[in-house]
Amino acid sequence: MKRSCSGPIQFLACVLILGLMTGCSDTIKTIESDNNAYQCSACQNKFYTGKDIFAACCPKCKSYELKEIVSYTCAQNHSNLAPRGSSVTCSTCGNSASRVQFPSEQALKEWGAAKASKAEVSKK
């Protein structure tokens, strides 16, 4: 019986290996992140945590209503931060921004997000 790379895990492995072999650092950059970014639905607070810290609540109002924030990029490579799953129009050129990646710490600071500690975003 002939086997092929048909399962989802095998497909992802093939894509990552191909990306590494061709020097495609954008593929890896899209998958990896140094931060987790959030916006509170209750008070609109913007914050981020380190890559190993996942927020359970807002550090400001302690609400559990958090939206994960990602960076959407348009064809002209403009970055737009918005909640994951949003339909985003680029704020710079007006085109659709559909490429998703994790925002950098610099982009989060420019957006107005503050870094929160594990103690600040943990359930009490």
Image (spheres, helix red, strand yellow):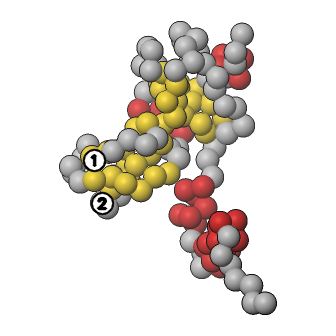
Quadrant occupied by the C terminus? top right
Element type at mark 2: loop
Amino acid at circle 1: Cys
Q: Residues within 10 Å of mark 2 (few under 14, many from 20)?
A: few
- CA–CA distance between discs 1 and 2? 9 Å
Number of marks in the image? Answer: 2
Residue drawn 53% across the image and 9% down it: 61
Q: Earlier in the sequence, mark 1 or mark 2?
A: 2
In-image side of 50 versus 110 (left or right) = right
Amino acid at circle 2: Gln
Q: Is residue 107 in view?
A: no
Identify whether 8 is placed above or below 45.
Answer: below
Identify whether 39 is placed above or below 78.
Answer: above
Q: Is residue 68 in view?
A: yes
Residue drawn 32% across the image and 45% down it: 88
Q: Residue furthest right?
A: 1
Residue drawn 43% across the image and 27% down it: 112
Residue drawn 57% across the image and 71% down it: 24
In terms of depth relative to the viewer, which is nearer, 45 or 64? 64
In terms of depth relative to the viewer, which is nearer, 86 or 104? 86
In terms of depth relative to the viewer, which is nearer, 74 or 57? 57
Return the x and y of residue 93 as percentages of the image width and height: 21, 51
Query: Which quadrant would residue 25 be assigned to in this image?
Result: bottom right
Q: Which residue is mark 1?
A: 90
Return the x and y of residue 73 as percentages of the image width and height: 38, 53
| CB atoms of marks 1 and 2 within 8 Å | yes
Quadrant occupied by the N terminus? bottom right
Element type at mark 1: loop
Q: Which residue is mark 2?
A: 76
